[in-house]
Amino acid sequence: MQIGLETLFGLSTFPFHLPIGSYICQASCLSPLAVFSIFGLVLIEVVAKANLGSVQRIGKLDPGFKGAQMHYIDNDGMFLLSNKSNFAFGLTTTAADVTQFLLVVMHKSSSTIVWAANRDSPVKNSDSFEFDASGNAFLQSGGSTIWSSDTASKGVSSLQLLDNGNLVLVGSDSTSFVWQSFSHPTNTLLPNQEFSQGMRLISDRGSANLTYSLEIRAGDMSLSAGFNPPQSYWSMGRDSRITINKGGGAVASAILSGNSWKFYDSSKVLLWQFIFSESSNANATWIAVIGSDGSITFSMLQGGSTNPSSTRIPQNQCSRPAACDPYAVCYPGNSCQCPSSLTSCKSMAAPPCDGQVELVGGGDDLSYFALPFVQPFSKETTLDSCKDSCLGNCLCGAMFFQNSSGNCFLFNEIGSMEGSSNGGGYTSYLKILSNGRRDGGGDSSKPFPIVIVIVIVTVVVILAMVFAAFRFYPKNKKAPETPRGSSEEEDNFLEGLSGMPIRFSYKDLQTATRDFSVKLGQGGFGSVYDGSLPDGTRLAVKQLEGIGQGKKEFRAEVSIIGSIHHVHLVRLRGFCADGSHRLLAYEYMANGSLDKWLFKQDKGEFLLDWNTRYNIAVGTAKGLAYLHEDCDVKIIHCDIKPENVLLDDHFMAKVSDFGLAKLMTREQSHVFTTMRGTRGYLAPEWITSYAISEKSDVYSYGMVLLELIGGRKNYDPSKSSEKLHFPSYAFKMMEEGKLKEIMDEKLKINEEDERVDIAIKVALWCIQDDMHLRPPMTKVVQMLEGLSPVPPPPTASQLGPRLYSSFFKSISEGGTSSGPSDCNSDAYLSAPTNSITSNALKGK
């Protein structure tokens, strides 16, 4: 029986109950001494429970655990030790900021981090890690999930830290692993940790803002630099230091064992060995780490220190992408030299497509790390033809010509080149702006007399204009200027915003973007340029154009994005409100926008696999859910499309471009606004001028999700009439039970992967004509993460390709709008609404 302490002590709010045993006792039978004894016992129990959260566990955590770093200060933020206490799991500070924390597995005696859950998204000391009753382990910050094991309702019984450093979620049978950190490595491999196809080690960011990755593909292990597209620079199969045990096999996995790295085929037959140390200590704990300089190093964790091996990968340090500055030449001994044709290698960047460009020599007898791993752009050609190919290709930033074979290689961007006293056999040329030369020579120059004539005529015209201005322009007339009231009002508005990002001067951003020389793209309200701050931080700087329209959007973006921080939303780093200049500085997203990866024409290019696509879908949904539900005011994005889903270097999705967002108060359920958004992703209510709500974003998201699933645009005139309009075809295939027909045929998908069925059903729920049938984005996230069942969606009221053809044809011919569309015209009334369908059937 339990006796409530509120009964014993007359405390109506006392939250505890005391178990008395199997006998019955009334409050009146207790003497005062017994009462105080019981109260003392209760206080002891309360204190014990209050301190239980800061007790360091050994071996495992049970469901229901929750801990923050601030509660485990006495244990250095570690709340779980392995049985032998050689590894610890918890929250530790980042190297750059002691107020920021990472969720890690750490080798305890050497304080070496061997796995991290949130390298790119550190949290505060009050943020918590939780292992909930459903079996899901996750890290939260400010109400947002930063990292999750995604193991809810999968039969997890406990979380354990093994003595080999593997963090595992154990199944209900107490033997199987539902999830393990060994299958999700970060930048470190531990002894006996199997590294197999599909896994990647990714370094921290290094110089030139590059990351490096290690993976097994095409039967070999290789290193790649995070350019766009990635560039390989080393493979184990080409390394002369390996010992071949069996030739001809394809590598499928690799394991650190003792002082060597062993490589196996899919049948676990040993193919190669790579011995990285002469030490044969069987008890030594060797780790392999991919560093921010692009090298793989090997260290022995022993006692309170790490003992590095002298062996490094790659062996030649000049074969690394960042051995020197980009475009510089690395010579033996790791000495760097900038080509004489360039003013400086530190400020070099690929020129914009709309500028006047030329090729300058990078040097002869050079080599480049990626050349052995890529196919030539053209074979058996001439140097002049190779140069013409680079000049005629907007994306070409550098070219290499192999003198012996006549092979021509083109690259969008490059790291450092490699020089050799023996000669590399390649001639290199770099593309620069025509005025970016150091010397006066070049491949294209105007005849001297013509240049002189042009200069003289220009000077005469300028002098004449200056004379006319002073002679005829009224002296008391002043140049128009921005109304003082308007300027002061805007400055007060900007200064009054809470949590505003950094305010840059126009000169700051002009310097950061190298005078706006590298254009990343063109949006509806201005151009976006590549930029870098003095500390190396890369930016995407948006220069708003058209002051009447741009100022309004500028205010909207600064006020909205400046106060929002979420892992799946592009972050605004700063802004400029300097005179008439309006600029926004965003975090740089290395892999650009989703459409560039999803709608590739070249079948040989890198393909987003199903896991990556699904994670992009979940991340985008989480970003929108945050805008709709977790902000102080509800935010509608209004322009969700693949172009506005950006990908970082790990292909994590972030929603961008809030310039079209419309704020809504919590009390408002709908809002009428001017027509915005992009054709092809607009919900029916936009077209018919019905009131819109956040459900309009849900519709656009559903269209994007369909494109992720199918790997194609929603309207493709090259397809058969049945497949012309993808949403209609998807509904038809779902009715016929042929879900495989909806999936991208280029993907390799496990037939038992239930996420395929979930994604398709969620997409079709999101694009329902009736906005009331569409789920909120929070529900979409739950369904995609398997936390909520997905019932079959309704299939009625969807328009066929016939009614869409005229609308989408104009898009396919004219390109997708990147800015707000003027959809008030009757020509655009082709969205799948019930009213339009009805009128069409009646011949109206």
Image (cartoon, helix red, strand yellow):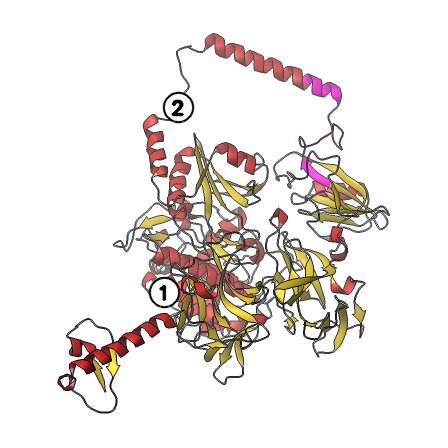
Give the SS element for disc 1. Answer: loop
Q: Which residues are magenta?
A: 430-453
Examine the structure image and report whether residue 186 is included in the region drawn in magenta: no
Check residue 451 for magenta coloring: yes
Q: Is residue 257 above or below residue 509?
A: below
> As shown in the figure, which amino acid type bears the numbered disc 2?
Glu
Q: Which residue is mark 1?
A: 775
Tell whether 397 sits left or right of 488: right
What crowding class fits label 1: few (fewer than 14 Cα within 10 Å), some (14-19), or many (20 or more)? some
Q: Amino acid at mark 1?
A: Pro
Image quarter where the C terminus lies is: bottom left
Q: Are marks 2 and 1 in contact (CB under 8 Å)?
A: no
Image quadrant containing the N terminus:
bottom left
Specify the label residue 289 is tagged with: none
Distance CA(mark 2)–CA(mark 1): 50 Å
Picture coordinates of residue 50, whole percent (x, y): 34, 70
The answer to whether 670 appears left or right of 757 in the picture is left
Q: Which residue is mark 2?
A: 481
